Amino acid sequence: MNKNLKDATKNRMIKDPEAQKKPPLRISHIVYGREKRGNRVYYLVDPKGGWAEKKIAEQVVLHRWRRRVFSGFTFSGGRLNSSVWRVLPSVLGKDPAKWRKLSEAAMQRQIDSCRESMREDHSTLPAAKVLKALFEHCGLERLKAIVARHTDPARIENFGTPDLFLYATDNKTGKVSIARFVEVKKPEEPLSDDQKEEINFLQSLGLHARVLRLIEREDS
C-alpha cells in the first residue's frame, strides 16, 4: 500500500470528535465582536455581546466556565500548553506518583523555579492548583498512560493536547466532581488529526474530552 493510500486509510479510521455525543458544558458557545489582532482573533467575553473586554477564543471559554454558578460547586480551570505532558517530567520529576503527593505550595515552588527555562523553550504550565485537580481527576494509571504517550520518542512530532482543562470542585469535600478536556475552535478552524487522535485517546481512558466550536454573531 503506497503512503498516500495509507494516510487516506488512517484518516478515515480516526473518529471525528465533533460527530460524537458530547458531555454538556452548559456555557454559551456564541461569540460577538470578532476582531483580528495580528494573527489572533479576539471576541467579547460576554455571551450576550455586552461589556468591552475581549479575549482570544480559549480565554473566552475559560472565562465563561469560571463564571458558572451551581449551588455547592466552584468552577475553575486552566489552559494547557501543547507540550504540557512533556514539560511536566522535567519540572516535577519523572514519577507521576510523586506529582500526586506534592502539596500545592511545593508544586508551585518547583514550577516557579523552572519558569526561566520554560520561557526559553516557549513552554508553560498551569498554576499548581489546576495541576493538582488535573492529577486528581486522571488518577495514577491514566496519568502514567498520558505521560508515556507524550514522551514516546516515536511521537516527538505529535501534539494535539486540548486547549483547556475545565473542572468543578465540590465545596463540601474539596474534591473534583466535574472535569472536561476541551479543544476550542473558531467557526471555520480545522481540527487536526493529532487533535482528533488525542481526544479519542483521552476518551478511551474514560476521560471526558470534546471539541467546542464557537458560533460567531455580528451583533447582540
Image: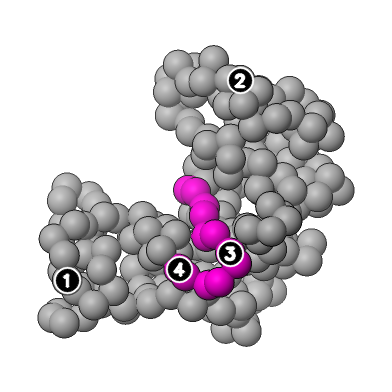
Q: Is residue 175 visible?
A: yes
The N terminus appears in which quarter of the rendering? bottom right
Residue where numbered disc 2 is placed: 110
Q: Nearer the viewer, mark 1 or mark 3?
A: 3
Residue at the image position 51 percent from the left and 20 percent from the top? 112
- Helix, strand or loop under label 4: loop
Residue where numbered disc 4 is placed: 68
Q: Earlier in the sequence, mark 3 or mark 2?
A: 3
Q: Earlier in the sequence, mark 3 or mark 4?
A: 4
Quarter of the rendering containing residue 14: bottom right
Residue where numbered disc 3 is placed: 73
**Count of numbered tags:** 4
Residue 161, image x, y percentages: 57, 51
Tags 2 and 4 in contact by the CB under 8 Å rule? no
Q: Earlier in the sequence, mark 1 or mark 4?
A: 1
Measure the alpha-carbon separation of dots 2 and 1: 40 Å
Measure the alpha-carbon separation of dots 1 and 3: 26 Å
Residue in front for this viewpoint, 68 or 96: 68
Q: Nearer the viewer, mark 3 or mark 4?
A: 3
Residue at the image position 26 percent from the left and 55 percent from the top? 55
Residue farthest to the front?
Answer: 172
Residue where numbered disc 1 is placed: 50
**Residue type pointed to by label 4:** Arg
Q: Magenta residues, as a range?
A: 68-79
Measure the alpha-carbon separation of dots 3 and 2: 29 Å
**Residue type pointed to by label 1:** Gly
Q: Earlier in the sequence, mark 2 or mark 1?
A: 1
Q: Is residue 18 above or below residue 90?
A: below
Measure the alpha-carbon separation of dots 2 and 4: 31 Å
